[in-house]
Image: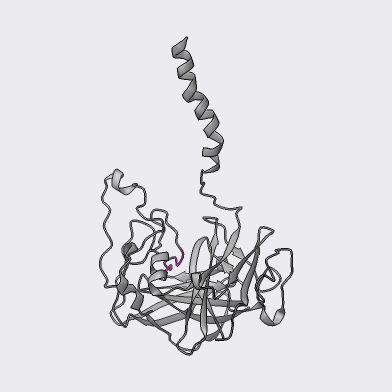
Amino acid sequence: MQYSKLALVPALALLICLPAAQAQQRFMELRGEITSPAYEGWWENEDGSFKLFYGYMNSNWEQTFNVPIGSANYFSVVEEGALNDLSVDGFDFAQADQGQPTHFYPRRNPFLFTIDVPADFGEREMVWTLQTQGQTLRAYGTLKPDYAIDPQVISTEVGGNFGSLSDALRDNISPDLRIEGENRRTVKVGQPLSLAVHASDPDNYPPPRPAPRLNDNLERLYRPPSSIVATSGPGLRFAWSVYRGPAEQVKFVPAQMKTYTDTRMYGNSAWSPPFTIPEPPADGRWTAEVTFDEPGEYVLRGVASDGSMFSYQNLMVTVTR
C-alpha cells in the first residue's frame, strides 16, 4: 500500500501541472489569428530630426490581410497617453497615411518602414492603429531612451550574419538601391510589366560567405534553434513584394524570395533552412516581370538587403482593364 501511495504522487503532480503546461503550448496557426503592429525603435538623423521604425507580426503562417488606409489602418500624432484606451477613435484623415503597408504578409515583418519626425517631436507619440479579425491593436512610437537603436540592434533583431553580435555591425551601411525607369507605371490586366533594379553593397559588410550546408543527418536537420530569433546568412540579395494592394492578384516571374521570416523548411526565405543566399548578378542588375489579374492601384516594394540592413524602393502601378 505504501508503494501505491508513492506512485500516486507523481501522477497527481502531473495532473496539477497539466493546465499550466497546456497554457504554454504554441501551435502553428495557418489562419484565424490577428496581425499586431510593432514599433521597433528610433535613431537620430544627421539634421537633428528622428527616424521611427515600424513593422508588424502576423501570427498566421499562411493567411494574409488587405487593410486599406482608413479607420482600420491609420496613424495619429497625439500627446503621450492620449490613445492608450483602444476604444478611443484617433482617426484623422490628414495624419492617417504615413506610408504604412496595406497588404500584410504572414509572420514577422520587422523594420518594414520608417517615419521621420521633427527635432522638437518631444514626448508626443506617433501611434499606429491596426484592426484585423475584428480586433484593434496599437503600436506607440515615442522617443523614449529605451527605444534608441542602431544598425547592430537591427541586425540582431533580424538574426543577421547568422546572429552575430559583432560591434562592427554598428557602422554597417544599407545597400544602395535604384529602380530603373519611372517610379510610376501604368499597365493593363494580364500584360507583363518589366522590372529592373540596380543594387550594391557599398561597404561589402557583412562579408558574404556561404550558409552552412545541412546534410542528411536528421538529428542535425531537425535540431532545435540555437537563437531566440530566426537567423540568416550575409550576402547581398534583392526581392520584390506587394506593399499595397492584393498580393494574391500579383504574379512575379521569376518567383521572388520571401521578405518575411518564414522559418519553415524549404520556405524560399532567407530564414528558412536549408538556404544559401543566391549569388547576385555580375552587373548588379536584377530583372523580373510582373502581371496583375485585377485592376487597381498597387505599390510594389523592392527590398535590397546585405543580411543585416535593408534598403527599400517603392514602385506605384496603376492597373487598368
Q: With respect to residue 101, does 265 lie above or below?
A: above
Question: Considering depth in this image, is 273 or 266 the residue closer to the camera?
Answer: 273
Q: Quadrant of the C terminus?
A: bottom right
- Image location (x, y in percent) of residue 306: 35, 73
Q: Quadrant of residue 287?
A: bottom left
Question: Considering depth in this image, is 182 or 55 the residue closer to the camera?
Answer: 55
At horizontal 39% and vertical 61% (from top left) the residue drawn is 271
At horizontal 34% and vertical 62% (from top left) the residue drawn is 163
Prevailing secondary structure of the magenta residues: loop
- Image location (x, y in percent) of residue 103: 58, 68
Q: Is residue 313 magenta?
A: no
User: Taking the image as drawn, is residue 282 in sight?
Assistant: yes
Q: With respect to residue 200, does 133 lie above or below?
A: above
Q: Is residue 110 left or right of residue 293?
A: left
Q: Quadrant of residue 19?
A: top right
- Image location (x, y in percent) of residue 62: 53, 56
Q: State the residue lying farthest toward the right.
A: 88
Q: With respect to residue 5, does 80 lie above or below?
A: below
Question: Considering depth in this image, is 270 or 95 the residue closer to the camera?
Answer: 95
- Image location (x, y in percent) of residue 276: 31, 63
User: Taking the image as drawn, is residue 172 in sight?
Assistant: no
Magenta residue span:
254-260
